[in-house]
Amino acid sequence: MIVLEDVHKSYGKLKILRGCSASVKLGEVVVVCGPSGSGKSTLIKCVNGLVPFEQGSITVDGVSVSDKKTDLPMLRARIGMVFQNFELYPHMTALENVSLAQIHVLKRSRAEADAGSEKLLARVGLGGKLASRPSQLSGGQQQRVSIARALAMDPKAMLFDEPTSALDPEMINEVLEVMQALALEGMTMMVVTHEMGFAQRVADRVLFMDGGEILEDTPKAQFFTDPATERAKQFLTKVL
Ligand code: ADP
Ligand code: MG
């Protein structure tokens, strides 16, 4: 579903990604971890075309992200992205946040979009919060709205960039549970997270990044018991 081949990305003279290759198969859950500044966010943003890269290729369901002929807004619409800071529209209700892109990008009628949004908000446990604005919701609830919003576009895959890092500890599990349910339903997912419990429960494979490189691409069981690199071992002693 997602294939990265030798992706290089620099900001000015600073090399951020130094030849990253990886793939995520249909229905697979891949957790990306590694120290702060290792390039995890940059990598995941390259996958949905938010960040351009100089060299290499990325395809999502066979469509090239960097090909100038690709309809990038449409491709991006079909890859769900969930950020650390929710990125909801503050002046809109939960329902309106989830319906907006369905109406403007997928050209659904408002009635059709709202009906879909209601179902999705119920699915993430927010059936009673349709009319609430973000400021009236907890961080965990806001993040679940943003997951519902991403799902509303019928995404081929979902990308998560530290979705629980901005949350109070007591709200982390309600978001991880929604993500776990999605994974069990067969969603293809790439998840940047330091929640190693989630990785142990849900991931198929773990990518470990350091210094702009993917140092490990390892089945979950092996990553946690016998990582291949010393740097991953050190990282695990800090996060486990
Ligand atoms: P991570 O998500 O693993 O913490 P990032 O991908 O955010 O890492 O960042 C990797 C490196 O790229 C860091 O050194 C960061 O300072 C740098 N970086 C990220 N975004 C930009 C940017 N827009 N301009 C310049 N440098 C950036
Ligand atoms: Mg990051």
Image (tube, rainbow, N blue to C red):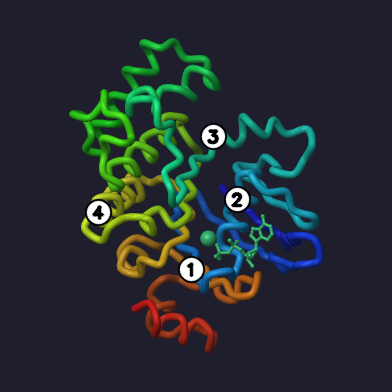
Q: Nearer the viewer, mark 3 or mark 2?
A: 2
Where is 48 relative to 96, above or below?
A: below
**SS class of the residue under badge 4?**
helix
The quarter of the rendering in which ligand 1 is drawn is bottom right
Residue 223 lies, with reference to residue 99, above or below; the image says: below
What percent of the width, then of the height, locates residue 221? 38, 75
First in residue order: circle 4 vs circle 1: 1
Q: Amino acid at mark 1?
A: Cys
Residue behind label 2 places its C-beta within 8 angstroms of ligand 1: yes
Q: Which residue is mark 2?
A: 45
**Tag in front: 4 or 3:** 4
Which label sits in the foreground, 4 or 1? 4
Identify the element where label 3 is drawn.
Answer: loop
x, y (%) of residue 186?
Answer: 38, 46
Q: Is 42 placed left or right of 197 in the picture?
A: right
Label disc, if present, on residue 78 of the rendered structure: 3
First in sequence: mark 3 vs mark 1: 1
**Which residue matches tag 1?**
33
Q: Quadrant of the C terminus?
A: bottom left
Q: Earlier in the sequence, mark 2 or mark 1?
A: 1
Q: Residue at x 51, y 72 (%)?
A: 34
Using a 10 Å C-alpha cutoff, classify the residue at mark 1 as few (fewer than 14 neighbours), some (14 to 19) or many (20 or more): many
Give the camera-side residue of 144 and 89. Answer: 89
Left or right: residue 156 versus residue 118 is: right
SS of the residue at dot 1? strand
Q: In the image, what residue type sits under mark 3?
A: Arg
Q: Earlier in the sequence, mark 4 or mark 2?
A: 2
Q: Amino acid at mark 4?
A: Met
Q: CA distance from mark 3 to mark 1?
A: 24 Å
Task: Give the amino acid at mark 2.
Answer: Lys
Mark 2 vs mark 1, CA separation in Å: 15 Å
Residue annotated with mark 4:
171
